[in-house]
Amino acid sequence: MINCIDVIKVYHDPITNYKVAALRGLDLNIKEGELVSVIGPSGAGKTTLIKILAGIELPTSGQISVKGQRYDHLLEFERREFRFHNLGLINQFISDNLFSHLSVKQNLMIPKKMFYLPKEQARKDVEEIAKLLNLRHVYNNKVGKLSGGEAMRLSMGVALAKDPLILLADEPTGQLDTKNTQDLIDAMRQVNLTLGKTIVVVTHDIRFRTIFEKSFIIRDGRLAGISRDMERDELEFLMHSSDINRSYMDASNFVRVPDEVKATAAIKDIVEFDTHPSRKLGLFWNPEAISRDKIYEIISKPAKESEEKLEQITFKDVEHLLSRAFIPPAKKKKLIKIKNVTKGYHSQAGYNEVIKNMSLDIHEGDFVFISGPSGVGKTTLLNMIAGLLKPNDGFVNVMNYPISEEKEREISSFRLANIAYVSQHNNLFDPIMVHENFLIPSIFSDQEFDVEYSDSIAKECHIVHRLDAYPYELSEGEKQRAALASALSRKTKIILTDEPTANLDTELARHIIDLLMDIVRINKATVVTCSHDLTLLRPGFRHIEMLDGKISKDTRITKENLEKIVREYLLIKENNK
Amino acid sequence: MDGFSKRKLLPVLFCLLFLSTFIATSVNATDQNITIFLSDTGNDYVTRFSSSNVVDSEGKLHVFVKKNFENNTFVILHIFNNQMVEIYRSSFSYDNIFKAYMMDEQVVLLFSHAGSYYESIIMMFSWSETGSNYQQIYTSSSGFYSINIIAGNNYFNLLFKEQHASGTLITQVTAYLNGTLSEKLFILPMPSNELVSLHMLDGELFAFFDIYSYNESSYSSLRTLIIVGVTGSYSYYNSTILIIESGFDRAQLFVGEDGKFHLTILEFQLFYSVSFSVNDTINMESFQTINLGVYHYEKYRMISYQNTSFFLFVTSSFIEILDMSRYNPNFRSAKISIIEDDNQTISLFSFLIENVHFYSFYGDEDYVERVSITLFENRTYVASYPTLIESKTLDDYNFKSRTVMAINVQTNSNVELPTKAFLFDLVSYSDFVYFWMKYWYTVVIPVVIIGTIYLIFMKRINRGFVKLKKFLTRPIKPDVSTFKLVFINFWLFLTNIFSVIFSLWKANKKRLIISLLGLTILASIIFTSATLYDSKANNLIVEFARNADFGNNNSASARFNLDLMSLSESGTSLINPNITEQTLDEIMYGIQSKSQILPKLIDNYYYDIHTGVVGFQLSPYEEMTHLTYRGYMSNYSAVFGSFLTSGRLPASENEAILPSSAALAYNIELNDVLTINATSSPGDIDIDTIEIEIVGLFQQPSHNQIENACALLSLPSDPIKSLAYDHSLVVPMEYFLRNFENVTKYHLQIYGEMQFEYDFDDSDAQEITNLIEEVYLLREEGPYPLSSSSSGYWSIGYELIIEFTGIDIILSVSYLLFIFLSIPILYLALFLVFEVNELFGSSFEQEIKILRSKGVSTGTITFSYSMMKLFESLVSIALGFGLTMILLPILLKVNKFLTFNDQIYSLVLTSLPAFISLTFVILILLSIPRIIILARKDKKKVKPPKRWVQLLKQLLPYLLPFILISWGVGIFFIGYFFMIVFGGIFLFMPGFEQFVLIFYYSMGIGLMITLLGVGLLLKGVHKLLMFVISKLSWSARKSITSFSLVEVRADINLFNNTFLTYTILVGLLLPFIITPIKIQNQVTNQAYFYGGGDLYVNEWSMANVSLEEFQAEYAEIAKLANITQLAVSHGNANLNILLIEDPLNYLATSYKPSSNLYENWDQDIKSLQENNTMLVSTPFSIFYAAEEDSYTFLKEDETDVEFSISGVFDYFPIIYDVGDLEGAYSYSYDIVMSKANFLRIFDRFNILGISLDRLIVKLKPLTDHIELSKEIEDDYGFNVHSSEENADATLLQYFPFYSMIVAEFVFGIIICLAAVVFTSLSNPLKILQRRKVKHDSLKKIGISTRQIIIVSAIELFIAAIVPGLLLGALAGYGIERAFNSILIELAYDILPYAMPFPYVLVICLFFGIPLVFFGIYYLSMKRNFAKYQPRNLE
């Protein structure tokens, strides 16, 4: 259905003449009716892939065909036409999918109306979709009153309303909690199963790796691995229960196997069977075709190795991650105290709790790494520490300063003095040069600006050669480095970084982590960083995993568990060791 | 039942059909007018076109048409019985003889042409039922310059004359129908140039000579008319001789069927005719005479029947058209005057033929030949004449040329006419071919354009077609034919797309409301202004009409001229004294029948008649003198009575009054009897006389005296205005003609003027507008003949036209002003609409993004959103209309600056539909481009644009302002130029203002474009300035301020717009507020300066009321003062002395002039209390006091009295208002002193008179001045003036649209306020939208929300608001000055009345606006800050 061969996409900025390769020879093959995910961290080229698959952009080179149609040979309007008829796009943000002022029904009707269908037919179709996606109860509600999950399901419904062959979803669960994510996944499965649609979900949420039948892992613009849910794949026949799958036990406890089953499974006279210890499940198999061991293997082994030729990452490639360890502070002086913090937002749909009764202490000089899927509340937590948000309940105390209690102005000046916050985007002021950007905080704080120090930081951040450039002249990576340099040169006690390496390539991202570690060491600063790229972890880091607004795991990374985490994260097989 | 009605219906229908046919045919029968021959004039070959018609014995018409071409070829066609036959064609044209005759049951055409060897050939064509033939009847080697053709029963006598050595050689050729020919030669000894014509009577040849002789001894010329009978080749005799004076002209001789000579002469307008036999003696008394009514220059013709002769005159209409510049010499109507003489009575009848084509203006001598007339004894006629007709005027005929030449036949007899038009050299095309020939481009050009477009975009269009076909035939329903599917699919398309559009449109309520608000404001401004203007203008016209003083505007409503003549000695025709009454009745009837509106409006009329000149002799030895003999209506008796200085008004016939000055000049005394001739023709001295006794002498009144005297009696003064200019012998109207009653020989040209009394109470503006057009038409078609006198006529005067042209000009000027004023408001409203569009651009963008991600095409998106905007525009227009209807009654009531006590005007909505459509277009033009831009915004361009396109794109923003400015200025000046050019030409044309309006509009549009360009330029300059400032300040010092400036630079477009908004805002607010206040102030000050106090009464001493008593009467009166000014002479100086009874009281009562008019008012007036103190005017001070501080009043034999001069003034209220501020050089020597002081020295003056005696009243606050003045007037009966009322009157006089200007100001202010509020609301949103990321960064660094808000507010202040305010103030000042020069300085005297400085206004503008802005800005920013945070991208 979708076939990409050696797809390369290079973005070219005509002003700065800077070229960025988003896709670097991606091979992808998705068959009709498949439900697959494409997983990769930020900057891996996921969005570019979606855009190319949707025909919004053309690859720089390589072949791409959808439904046998070579995209790279089509004109813009032809691609649009193709998209109009064959593709359903689900964007990450609900606002990009739905007309927020319209009701569920109206939103579903719009694609139908765009196809100029008779009203009755459209209404019938739409009602079915609503039923399928469990949206009947909110059918006449405005989008603004829907919960995140409902809205995303509606987004899928709107995409489905066009009756496309393929659904392309870009980070559909990015804003959803686990429950809603699960609901959405179920809905997708349902759609895949009942309507036979090919569904491609592009995400960085590694949970998808095991959920769908096939997952393509991409990193740095290339296919890094295919994960196949083999059990699911092979046990799928269980999903189709019918009379032929049904056997009747007679009074003498003989079980009669339907002829059809017998024929398809090539069962001769004997079948073997066994029961699960739970006594809820029995299994029978053809002993002539499969041995007991093999069955055990199938059930126990999580995924089968892909037969396809892949550029496989070996552990060797990442082994050096373990080499540099962070030394946790010896003194356990509490720098940030978070006590029973609850944070939620009121929306038209109701109350949505992001952080749920969280308590957390962070010690001075520590390096805290918070991971977890999108929407679990990482950024909210960081914002609360920075005083940008106030908790609904509980309190946050930073350096003995009740940051959750004070007035906004006080907090701001406290933040100006003590906290450097670097986020994924939006850290630099465009109209002034990079080195001038470093000055901005000192302008507001009236503090002396340490030129030498900032220069050294700039050097460390590999940005010293671009100090006289304007931010818009920089690449995303350079921007990120400049932003970091700017933040770090402030010598603040607390450094908060939210996805600091999102736009950097793997190598540089890891270098930045090293730099942060240095800063902690030299400045006795405390770093709290949020990321879902687990390869950024280092031995000695405090790793807090969050799930649905709660801390699910709080561990100190050791070399051993880091290795396991990295292996798991990068799908490095044991036998490759 | 059905059957019954059907059965009944049929006969009824049949009857109706029959009836209508009958009516139609009977209508046709009376006056037929048919075009029977057409020829193309499009080519240059046709030079001449002539016709000759004859009616055969069966009453069928034969028309011969001769068509001459440029190459000398001519063609003769015979049109008869619905056939056209070419009967002759020759390439040697010689245009001399061409005439059809009816003789011996045959139709005969005689015509001539040149032969191939310089000879002349005369041809005869004859036609009868049995056949036709033509023959050459005569050939001559020389041309026949003078030929007389005399048709007999079956022959022609052709008579030629030639100059011969011994006189005149006459050739007589007799040509018979059967072809036989005889020729005779005669020689007469008289010169051939004196031979007028040749005739045959009873087979004998007669020559008619007109011989001119000059009598040197008596200095007079005489003409001898001789009829010479030619008896043989060389023998002749003088049959009849008549000697006439040189005043006669055009003597012609005819021979009638009665076998008699008919001699006719013209003298000016008089036609003389006499018939006599051979050898009869005639003299002037033998002639019968009739007035032809016009002076006739051309030859005329006689058609003779046994007992009756008809003389045919063809006169072109140019004499009657007064405006020669509009005259088309080739195309006019002709008047056929026919004098019928049956030897007993002579009478005149005439008819008109329209659009006769003459080849040149003066060249055609014989109009009578142009128009071929067959006249019958019963006065019926058939006239055929060349004309030009437009092809579209003829049904069923399509010609290529716009106009074609044709022969028109007009008849009042039932001659059998051809029923169809005949074509020669001309093709009548079928409708289809004609369309193609004429309007091919309407098809070809679109086809070429469409074809080219198709060729260029072939792929795309084909694709579209394929797509369309696919869509329309998609099998949406099973088992439905393709044909049906097309309709089903189309219907589905419509319902679905509009459902989407509508649901999207109404979904975003906030956006919808604000958008609608912006558009509605714009729509209602346009509607309100247009309707307001219409209403006011209409009401103004009506008011103007009602208040116009038609009776005293020195212009008559109508004029008439009667030519009363009776010169015959037999003297039966006495003067009919009722002729004026009959004339007036006829005029009124004429007006009634020729127009609809005018007769309704005429309530009454007055008139005046006079004869041009009347000779009178007091004694036979004295020379003739000329006086005007005038009649007055009895209504005016009292007026004349008031002018009488001695004697009485005439009470019976033969009595008259005379101006005393005339009496003095002519040495006439009261009761003298004048003998006057009954003629206004200077030559008629032998005419009857009448005797008139002068019974009264009157003082010749001045213009004003006449007006005043008439005003007292509520009579119009126009009819007797000329009394002021000429010496009139005046008699009551009833005796005017009765005085001449018994005279038998008279010649009176009587001129009359009518003055109508109009009643406009029930008319509206539309009616008045129509009236003017009607009057124009009446004027144009006039003058109209009068039945009461043969050459009498009447015409409508210019009065109404002149009067209403005045209002036209006022309206036009107001329109100009109005448009210029509305430009800035519109500009601002447009700006608001743009702002709204921009503000919601992002929400549209979002929606478009959603649709785009679904794969919806740009076309569909554009279509949908454009339709949405269409909806919006429609709704806005509806709302705007509603709003207008609510606002208008209030705005119509505005009469002064924000006072609402005007009478309610009626709403006039005539131009509203036009403005609604215009606004609709504007709104769409404003909204849709933005949508198109948005819809196409994300469209990825695969190829980068070409370099020059890129360059152009980069340059355009810089060039655009200059391009716009040059366009705007260009359009403005083109409009201005044409307005000046055409304005001058068409100033007095009806519909002038509509015409000039186009130029006003183009000027307005030009100005608007210029302003747009200037706005953009300002933006550019601002951008550049901010760029430089921010660069400099940032490099100089890194601080929050310099950082802010850098930020401003980054978002310069945002600040730019705000800057521009505030510039416009203040630029408008200043003049909007100041100008009306200033006008009001100026007018009020002026009124007070002239009046001297709140109320004043002139000639107070005449009122005989004591001050105390008067004051006690009215509680509202605060103070009273009486001042008197005396005109005195002192030595050789003429002085004016203003006396003040009690200076302190005066000070408290009088209006206090502002300090720039009078510096130390209080002090100076107080100083008058002191002994021997006075104030003097600057001229007095300079010329008499030698600029010393004192002046000595001298008198012989008395001690000198020295007065100290405590003050010198340039301007003093009431008495003195002219002069230059610096060193006044008006030569008015004024002194102001107290009465007590004056009494000390009064004997030193020679008092010439009292020039002023005024009571000044100061009223208590809160008194209604106007009401009180009316109350006093009612109580005491004297005229009380209120300065306030005077101010109001002035205001209305100079600014009929003042209230409209105020309304516009009010509107402008509302809009400005709305703009302030709106920008205060929209700016934070825009800033938040645009700086989402920046604010996030700042927050993360540790900058508080408050600080961010304040910093951006400061940024706005520094970068946008303060410069905007300053520049706006500058612009506002400029506009205000400009208004000043247009509105104030031009309309008023130049006195610089002080304008109170509008502190409140300035404070409001410069502190209020920023404060309002900041308040709203801060709140809005704070409220919305949290909403505009960057999305969490992970």
Image (spheres, coloured by chain):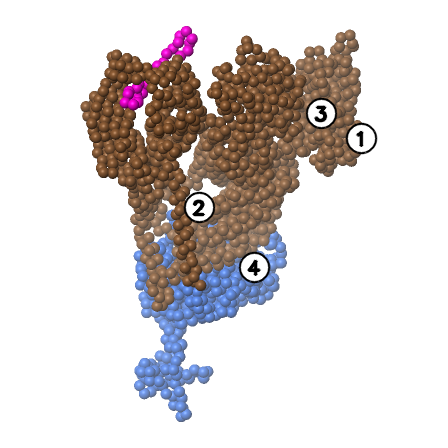
- Which chain: blue? A
Identify the colour of chain B in the image: brown
- The residue drawn where x is 51% and y is 43% is B911
Q: Of residues A82 and B220, which is closer to you in this image?
A: B220
Gap in Å between the C-alphas at discs 1 and 3? 33 Å
Q: Do the residues marked 1 and 3 share a common chain?
A: yes
Q: Which residue is mark 3?
A: B1160
The stretch of residues the image draws in magenta is: B194-221
Q: Which residue is mark 2?
A: A469
Tell us which disc is closer to us: 4 or 3.
3
**What distance separates the C-alpha of mark 4 from that of mark 1?**
89 Å
Quadrant of the frame with the C terminus of chain A: bottom left
Three-letter code for the amino acid on which mark 3 is drawn: Asn
The correct choice, above or below, for B1406 with respect to B743 in the image is below
Closer to us: A493 or B713:
B713
x and y percent of residue B960 in the render?
Answer: 43, 39
* Residue A395 appears anywhere in the view: yes
The numbered mark at residue B1109 is 1
